[in-house]
Image: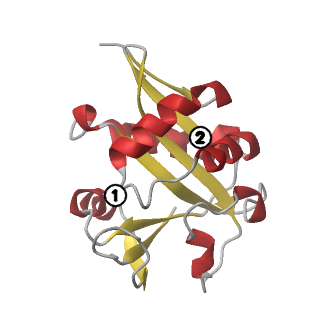
Amino acid sequence: MKISIRNAEESNIEGILLVEHDSFHKDIAESRSVFFDRIKVFPEGFLLMEIDGEIAGYISSEMWEYSENIDTDRFRLNHNIADIHRTDGSELYISSIGVIKKYRGKGYGKMLFSELVERIGSSYRIASIILIVSENWNAARKIYENNGFLEIQRINGFFEDDENSDAIVMRKYL
């Protein structure tokens, strides 16, 4: 099995969308144009994992100015990265991570996450990492907690899924 992690390119959009739709409820999956914008605005913050030549997962991110009092509108699904991303920001926002079902539970998401943090950390001065996770995504939340992320806020009814679940904002200081 050959595993590679590389920067996403616009030509990978179909594979990225397959991962997105395999990973998220149809009402919270993000759009093609959002992924194009993320690749265009912050290509080094958007990584793909390929397993034997197949796109198996991705992670996308943005650089934000650190703020103790977070404007929860920043987390809005399908927001335009160009409105918030700041290359001189000190906080890395993990905007999305997905791994197709057949590769889940094997550590690939953690591998993508670690690779992104290592790459961005070597090129940018990041002091913290922030992300949101659904209250219902127990496995993901456990991974983040085990890696030093703490719940700092909740956004009631954030996800437009079947449960209208809350988003948990988590942050880790580096």
Q: Residue at x 63, y 25 (%)?
A: 11
Residue 111 vertical placement versus 95 (above, below)? above
Q: Which residue is mark 1?
A: 147
Q: Name the kind of residue labelled 1 in the image.
A: Asn
Which element is circle 2 on?
Answer: strand
Q: Residues within 10 Å of mark 2 (few under 14, many from 20)?
A: many
- Residues marked 1 and 2 touching at CB (< 8 Å): no
Q: Position of residue 126 (x, y in %)?
A: 63, 58
Q: Residue at x 36, y 64 (%)?
A: 148
Q: Would residue 14 be seen by someone viewing this image from the given angle?
A: yes
CA distance for labels 1 and 2:
21 Å
Q: Nearer the viewer, mark 1 or mark 2?
A: 2
Residue 77 in which image quadrant: bottom right
Q: Is residue 97 left or right of residue 47?
A: left
Q: Would residue 122 be seen by someone viewing this image from the given angle?
A: no
Q: Residues within 10 Å of mark 1 (few under 14, many from 20)?
A: few
Q: Which residue is mark 2?
A: 46
Q: Is residue 7 left or right of residue 85?
A: left
Residue 11 vertical placement versus 65 (above, below)? above
Residue 14 or 130: which is nearer the viewer? 14
Q: Position of residue 74 (x, y in %)?
A: 62, 72
Residue 163 in which image quadrant: bottom left
Q: Name the kind of residue labelled 2 in the image.
A: Phe
Residue 83 vertical placement versus 118 (above, below)? below
